[in-house]
Amino acid sequence: MTLLDASTMYNRITSVFFALLLSSATHAQVGQASTGSNSYQFTKGLVALTGSRYGREAIYTDPLAYQLYTNTLKQPTEGATFGTDDQGREIKWLAVTADSLNRLRLRGNFRGNGGAPAGPGVTPGSIRGGLGWGGGYTYLTYPSTRDQVALLNIKGNSNVYVNGELHMGDAYSMGYLHIPVKLKKGVNEFYVRGTTVTANLSFPAKSALLRTDDPTLPSIRIGESNTSLQAAVVVVNASTNGLMGLQIKSKVAGKELTTTLPPIPAMSSRKVAFLFDGSGVSAKGAQNCDLTLLQKGKQLDQATLSIEAVAPGASYSKTFVSQIDGSLQYYAVTPQLSASTAPSALFLSVHGAGVEASGQARAYKPKDWGTLVAATNRRPRGFNWEDWGRLDALEVLTIAKDEFKPDPRHIYLTGHSMGGHGTWFLGATYPDKWAAIAPCAGYPTLKEYGSADGVIPDSSTNPLEQTLLRAGNQSDVLKLVTNYKPLGVYVFHGDADQTVPVRYARQMRKLLGETQPDMSYYEYPGGSHWFGDHSVDWKPLFDFFKWHQLPVDSTVNAIDFTTANPGISSAYRWASIEQQTKPLHYSRMQLTRTKNAITGTTTNVDLLKLALNEFGAKAPVKITLDGGTAVDYTTTSTNDTLVLRKEKDRWTPTSRPEVTQKGPHRNGTFKEAFANRMLFVYGTSGNAAENEWAFTKARFDAETWYYRGNGAVDIIADTDFVPGQYADRGVVLFGNATTNKAWSKLLAKCPIQVSRGQVTVGSERYTGDDLGGYFIWPRADSPMASVAVVTGTGLAGMKAANANQYFAGGSGFPDFVFFNISMLRDGAKGIRTAGFFDNNWSLASQEGGKE
């Protein structure tokens, strides 16, 4: 029996026989209503180890999704065969029942989703597992007596198809993902990607709800003004119409403020920021913040938050509006012990997986010579301090410098576990920002220690997959070890660590021992992954910091700097790699400055910028690079800058490139467009199925961005997109030239064109309705923003583009990649083309390949 046949048959059953249907339901159709509440707990289901593989690259395989998208998926029954594994063995649907914790899971030696790592306030456990395993699906059904809306809460899954509609999952079992879903009268099917899950439905009495289980909160600091503080909570729209004209009224200690909220699309949720006045609070401790959700003066819902008031000198949290997406984020601070008239130090601390920034800050005792600031990585697990975690760290660093005005020579970086990786990564990526770094219990690279999303593949025999992997080269710290040379490096690790084994510290000690002139190394005897606050707040580490300071530029006459992507990191001190010869290969500059000359060598550098301010005005400078002909130049001012281009192995002065070219301001890859307060634009000019896909995919990405990045994003229809109203904002476009009216406004001059039935990439043409892809293109009306396109040539191709592991930290996505839906079954064999635009955003000398 097909899914359609089953649904049609069930819809014909009258309510007279509904109880009989329940009594004879299959394993997957049985659950129980929670006592005293309007909810339903799934207690039985079916599990198949289908072999889905998602990870840190554009390629993914998912046999169940392939069958679902190609309409070949058979309705599961106990003992039925789903397919065969890579060794030819049958994959069966197996019955599972809930345990005492309501977890639906296979028993025996089967291992489900991984545990949580250790850190301040977190129990030690495995970091591995999570999203990147070769996994399976849990199949659930719910027989509904009528069409209705429910809130779906599943823990332990990566995503879920609800009657074929894709939604985000709660891979880390946080519990705060409440997804509004439409249930039809009859059997509702849930394909849950995950094999150890808990799942329930609740049936809200209201169509607009305040959710306070995942707030973003500042501290109320006693003695400060506190009149206009910002916090954020989730508003759920459980109706089939968009919500407009919403407001939140807040009340704390008798003080009220009202905030107007952005629109919330139908059947979705959004984390929204609101103002509150904490000036009436005079005592430390938990304070109630009463919230009322209003629409045109009418009350829709009420809730109460608890906000902590802290004494002067205590660690605190402070919120800010992120430039990445316009959402509200926070950072945590452990203030300096006592005031000082001299500029003080700043310590940026990056936390481990599963750890809140507020907990990270509290792990440190106040220091008498500096302030400690902890960024969030956008979530306790977030992005491994890469991608948007990296941007979050840089945002907080900039804010902290402006707020605390530290001595610019005394800026330090440290972190634990995943934050130890963040320290290695941020230290190598931005070596001129820190006087010293101190990774604690850290792993250097995601190619060896993958964390929840799995490892970045190290290599491939498939040339197209090699192109994809090259897009993640910036994550390979081991290729950047020479960037540490100007830094002090203190490596701290417990020698009995079972979560991040000490071999990673020893690996880095060996690598740095050959090149690093300034390193201290200590293994804590008997130390596990987390052995108390001194796992991070280690006095010898801070003593090491105190001995180091950043030199001023005038004293730095030698540069040795490597980068894989100038759009992520281009400059060290007075030199900058502006453009590469081969995109995303490693570029290196080794330069020496003397009284009247600069000499050195470069690798994979097409355009080099040199700041000549230290030479003075009207000074002759001889520049000799790569053993070629010297460039004789006379400075024009004390702030002169020289740009050199390499042409046929000869360096010649040139003008600064136009902002329309690639450069540090905008260099690709695909993921770069998810910034500058990005906007999601879905197509409405296709057929009904194409339009439904576009909105569902935009909502799925918004749900994922909220879950993984504590983010919020505006979602609009193509017909509402007016470029001038969204100036300088990143745009993520869903659809193709046939189905999305915004295409012609943003992509008319792009050499990649996608329409119903075909893709053209320069001179190459691919046809069929089953091609999907991703690509980036600069906004012609902006010097910095780009368009990311999630597209397909037809419904099958669009669905093939559903996976969004571009939100996995460190995953590599080039400027463009196109694939057939067969990729879901066959992996890299399904890729059709992938590559990079050149520095003129042209495909004339495209770096990449095709099948």
Image: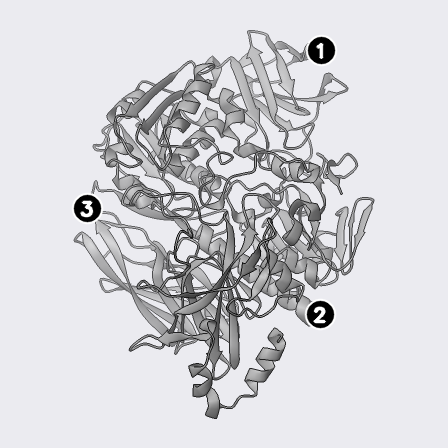
- Between disc 3 and disc 2, whose residue precedes? 3
Q: Is residue 579 left or right of residue 205?
A: right
Front-most of residues 25 and 442: 25
Would residue 564 be seen by someone viewing this image from the given angle?
A: yes
- Mark nearest the camera among 3 and 2 is 2
Q: What secondary structure is found at the residue carrying circle 1?
A: loop
Front-most of residues 308 and 184: 184
- Between disc 3 and disc 1, whose residue precedes? 3
Identify the residue at image location x=70%, y=49%: 830
Dot 3: within a 10 Å radius of its alpha carbon, few (fewer than 14), some, or many (20 or more) residues?
A: some
Residue holding disc 3 = 311
Q: In which quarter of the image is residue 108?
A: bottom left
Q: In this view, does 349 lie to the left or right of 839?
A: left
Circles 2 and 1: CB atoms closer than 8 Å:
no
Q: Is residue 851 above or below residue 76?
A: above
Q: In this view, does 604 lie to the left or right of 511?
A: right
Per the rendering, the mark at residue 628 is: 1
Identify the residue at image location x=60%, y=34%: 459
Dot 1: within a 10 Å radius of its alpha carbon, few (fewer than 14), some, or many (20 or more) residues?
A: few
Would residue 721 be seen by someone viewing this image from the given angle?
A: no
Identify the residue at image location x=37%, y=62%: 103
Q: Which amino acid does label 2 sit on?
A: Asn
Dot 2: within a 10 Å radius of its alpha carbon, few (fewer than 14), some, or many (20 or more) residues?
A: few
Residue holding disc 2 = 687
Q: Which amino acid does label 3 sit on?
A: Ala
Front-most of residues 731 and 20: 20
Give the CA separation, mark 3 to mark 1.
64 Å
Give the CA separation, mark 2 to mark 1.
60 Å
Image coordinates for residue 521, horizontal then vertical, percent: 34, 20
Q: What secondary structure is found at the residue carrying circle 2?
A: loop
